[in-house]
Amino acid sequence: MKKLITALTCTTIIFSGALSAKAEKKNDPDKKDVEKLLKEIGAEHYVERMKVRDFCSLKYEKTEDEDSYWHIYSGQLKEGGYHVIIYNNVPEYLGFYRVDFEPVEYEEGKIMLDSGDSDEDGNSYFYDLPLPDKGPAATVRIDGVPTKFVKNPKLEAEKTEVAGTKTGGIPVVPKETTASGEVIDYRDWTITMGGKQVTVNAIYVKFEKGKVTIKNSKNGREAEIPGSALSTEDQEYIKRMIAK
């Protein structure tokens, strides 16, 4: 989709509740580490003489304890075009979109690509590259053209190794269980704090002194939640977790 807006620099765009001086952009990898990893993966993930630059950190979710971000890098190709390189907040390299237009701006839930066109007043036209809370879509349309997200094969292989598979000769890795035989797995937790109810997909870590520690499936962050803030169903689940 093509949009007409007044040109701004990436560093001047401010979301509601402006970013604080304590650098909420946590876990963004160093540009040198990004380049090193892309070279290690190789193939289409790294093109010779590709110039990688730190583009921005895009806030996507506010958890109980901190904000989370997609960390975006731009890879300029010698022959023309760009890689929009995306990390999560763990940080893990997720993959990239190959686009013909330079990423120059961002807003909540999207990266904005310069179309190269502007009106008579100097206002630039942009194409939207959506980046929703749930992560990069397998395919997006930019200027009407389907654009595929190229996943990090190393990360996909690691996920397969952890989860196991019934094909390809890789043995299935059983999920961890408690002493009572309860399977420890990611699930939706319903948490009520400050009068607000939220649902978080996370895995049980431990229960001590009336508080449960869970690990968020989206960003890998652990949070300690009072047992009283959990739903009845969650409290019953905890009882099964700690039963002997």
Image (cartoon, helix red, strand yellow):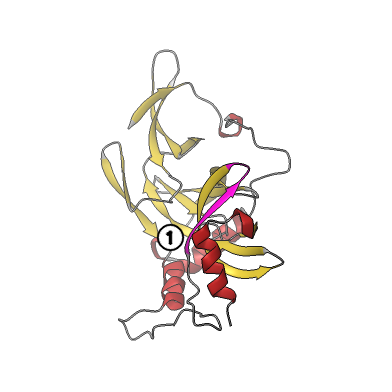
User: Is residue 197 at least partly visible in the picture?
Assistant: yes
Task: Give how far across and how far down residue 171 sits, in percent.
Answer: 38, 86
Of the pair 81 and 79, the residue shown nearer to us: 81
Relative depth, front residue between 28 and 166: 166
Q: Residue at x 56, y 48 (%)?
A: 69
Residue matched to label 1: 45
Q: Residues within 10 Å of mark 1 (few under 14, many from 20)?
A: many
Q: In which quarter of the image is the N terminus?
A: top left
Q: Is residue 136 left or right of residue 239?
A: left
Q: Residue at x 57, y 49 (%)?
A: 192
**Quarter of the image where one finds residue 114:** top left
The magenta stretch spans residue 150: no
Residue 169 in the image: x percent, y percent? 33, 86
Furthest residue in direction top, as rendered: 121
Q: In which quarter of the image is the C terminus?
A: bottom right
Residue 219's x, y, as percent?
Answer: 55, 57
Q: Position of residue 186 (x, y in %)?
A: 48, 66
Where residue 126 sits, quadrant-wise, is top left
Q: What residue lies at 53% left-to-right and 82% top-to-bottom?
A: 180
Please give left or right for residue 65 compared with residue 40 in the image.
Answer: right
Vertical comparison of 112 with 75: above or below: above
Q: Is mark 1 on a helix, strand or loop?
A: helix
Residue 189 in the magenta stretch? The answer is yes
Q: 190 left or right of 164?
A: right
User: In the image, what residue type sits under mark 1?
Assistant: His
Magenta span of residues: 187-195
Please tell me whether the stretch drawn in magenta is mainly helix, strand or loop. Answer: strand
